[in-house]
Image (cartoon, rainbow, N blue to C red):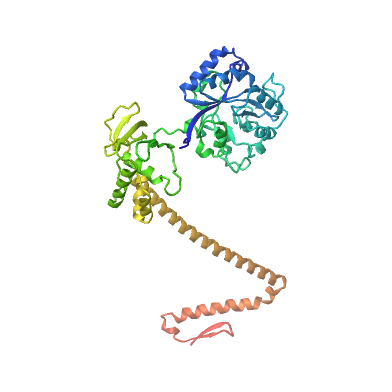
């Protein structure tokens, strides 16, 4: 089976012993400096180093050789300044020697390497094209500090370019200078990108002790620490690039590997990803058998009697007498400790520490919430809403207080929706009234402009008097006074007579 992807800690801006001189300090002895860099890499579990001396590769050659000899993967490179004076770090395959790298420096407009701080004659995007042509990788260095792409300002066209895939920030995403926070979060319209760059930590290593800092390195997920895999990881930064500040404080349980000795599966050895492992294969290639082997190691037979009977037959057929299953796991319940679960055919599982010491723990002590489902069981669950709800409630635990808050929020949303509908209806009615009023005003203006108002004045007076007559008649008619039993209203003479 192929290797599973893992996170590798990478320090991508390591300088040679001469960098102290660039900072105005006395440089350490080269051999002593190289030894200390290795020591701090090992102490901090740094597997990959990117060399980034300013405008030079020759000064880093001895450090490159020393680290490589001691198992550290080294991507050679350099830090340069573009024509816009933006600092960028360029890294290349560990297969390139310093002669080829010097040729690349010359191609980038930096043939004179005596002063590594001199800017190139080429723009940032021109350099980006050439780095891509040479199969390299680059990132924008210290973007919020001096000579950083955001600090310089007016570099939106470079920031928004698809060629910029990675950018170095000084710390965690929650520590960004407020002046740049909207840009980093991709909410600034002027700097908006179709896709965020990968944000990495990579500190200019002035002394070996700088490697101890969290912001000196970044975690990159790869199946193996090669330059091609390194570049590929930046195509999916959301899942493959992680800052040290984003590491989980708690450990998740995971299957790490399984091996089988004896039986039909003799010699089987599989490594699993700590996050997600997918078993893919055609019919009869052993997918279900592998799941059953894990299940047997954990002593977790299917609950259904028929399924359990089929499971036991499968195990007997594929394992048989003398076979042994070894399952290596990491336990959340035991604070990230690793254990070996070993089970011989027709024996109970035995829990061992990594140094093969028998532990008093049982499976339920180290994996208390593990759940395993076969194909038929998944099909059964998928067809039953109650079973789906039961399984998801175990996988996604939500306390009652949170559920109550959700219910209250749902009720408030419905209430707000009804209120908004009522307001919208009133707005629509008001709009209609306004339109009618505007029409009436236009008609009134027309009457005034044509002199109709003066001509209609007698009719307006008559209309008002008729209204008065109607009002008085209604009052008299409803009066309890017997003197007004009969009433005559003479509209012709504009008067009222009482008989």
The residue shown at (34%, 53%) is 387
- Indicate the quadrant where residue 427 lies: bottom right
- Indicate the quadrant where residue 481 lies: bottom left
On the image, the x and y values in percent for residue 399 come to: 34, 45
The residue shown at (31%, 30%) is 352
Q: Is residue 221 left or right of residue 379?
A: right
Q: Is residue 147 above or below residue 469?
A: above
Residue nearer the viewer, 48 or 326? 326
Q: Is residue 436 above or below residue 101?
A: below
On the image, the x and y values in percent for residue 272 come to: 42, 37
- Say how many tags the image has: 0
Q: Is residue 190 above or below residue 379?
A: above
The residue shown at (43%, 45%) is 285
- Indicate the quadrant where residue 52 lies: top right
On the image, the x and y values in percent for residue 428 come to: 55, 63
Quadrant of the rendering where the N terminus is positioned: top left
The residue shown at (47%, 23%) is 44
Q: Is residue 348 left or right of residue 200?
A: left
**Residue 105 shows in this picture:** yes
Residue nearer the viewer, 468 or 191? 191
On the image, the x and y values in percent for residue 376 come to: 36, 52
**Residue 252 shows in this picture:** no
Q: Is residue 64 above or below residue 440?
A: above
């Amino acid at each position: 089976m192929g290797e599973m992807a893992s996170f590798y800690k990478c320090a991508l801006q390591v300088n040679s012993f001469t960098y102290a001189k660039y900072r105005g300090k006395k440089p350490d002895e080269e051999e002593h400096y190289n030894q200390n860099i290795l020591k701090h890499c090992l102490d901090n579990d740094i597997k990959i180093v990117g060399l980034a001396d300013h405008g030079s590769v020759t000064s880093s050659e001895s450090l490159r050789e020393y680290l490589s000899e001691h198992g550290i993967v080294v991507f050679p490179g350099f830090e340069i300044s573009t024509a816009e004076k933006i600092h960028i770090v360029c890294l290349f395959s560990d297969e390139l020697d310093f002669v080829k790298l010097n040729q690349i420096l010359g191609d980038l407009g930096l043939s004179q390497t005596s002063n590594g701080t001199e800017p190139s004659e080429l723009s940032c995007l021109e350099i980006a094209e050439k780095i891509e042509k040479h199969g390299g990788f680059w990132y924008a260095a210290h973007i919020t500090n001096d000579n950083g792409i955001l600090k310089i300002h007016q570099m939106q066209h470079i920031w928004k370019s698809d060629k910029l895939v990675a950018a170095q920030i000084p710390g965690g995403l929650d520590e960004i200078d407020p002046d740049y926070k909207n840009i980093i979060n991709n909410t600034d319209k002027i700097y908006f990108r179709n896709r965020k760059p990968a944000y990495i930590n990579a500190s200019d290593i002035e002394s070996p002790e700088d490697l101890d800092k969290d912001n000196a390195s970044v975690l990159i997920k790869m199946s193996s620490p090669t330059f091609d895999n390194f570049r590929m990881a930046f195509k999916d930064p959301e899942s493959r690039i992680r800052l040290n500040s984003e590491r989980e404080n708690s450990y998740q349980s995971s299957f790490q590997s399984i091996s089988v000795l004896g039986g039909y599966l003799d010699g089987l050895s599989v490594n699993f990803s700590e996050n997600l492992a997918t078993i893919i294969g055609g019919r009869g290639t052993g997918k279900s058998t592998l799941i059953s082997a894990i299940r047997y190691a954990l002593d977790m037979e299917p609950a259904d009697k028929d399924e359990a009977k089929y499971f036991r037959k499968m195990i007997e057929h594929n394992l048989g007498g003398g076979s042994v299953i070894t399952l290596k796991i990491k336990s959340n319940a035991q604070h990230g400790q690793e254990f070996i679960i070993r089970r011989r055919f027709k024996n109970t599982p035995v829990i061992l520490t990594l140094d093969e010491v028998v532990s008093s723990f049982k499976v339920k002590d180290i994996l208390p919430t593990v759940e395993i489902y076969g194909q038929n069981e998944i099909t059964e669950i998928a067809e039953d809403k109650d079973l789906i709800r039961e399984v998801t409630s175990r996988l996604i635990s939500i306390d009652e207080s949170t559920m109550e808050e959700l219910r209250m929020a749902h009720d408030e949303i419905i209430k707000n929706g009804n209120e908004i509908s009522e307001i919208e209806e009133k707005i629509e009615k008001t709009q209609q009234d306004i339109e009618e009023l505007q029409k009436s005003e236009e008609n009134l203006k027309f009457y005034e402009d044509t002199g109709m108002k003066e001509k209609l004045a007698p009719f307006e007076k008559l209309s008002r008097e008729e209204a008065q007559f109607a009002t008085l008649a209604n009052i008299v008619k409803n009066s309890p006074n017997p003197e007004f039993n009969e009433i005559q209203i003479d509209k012709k003479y504009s008067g009222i007579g009482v008989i």
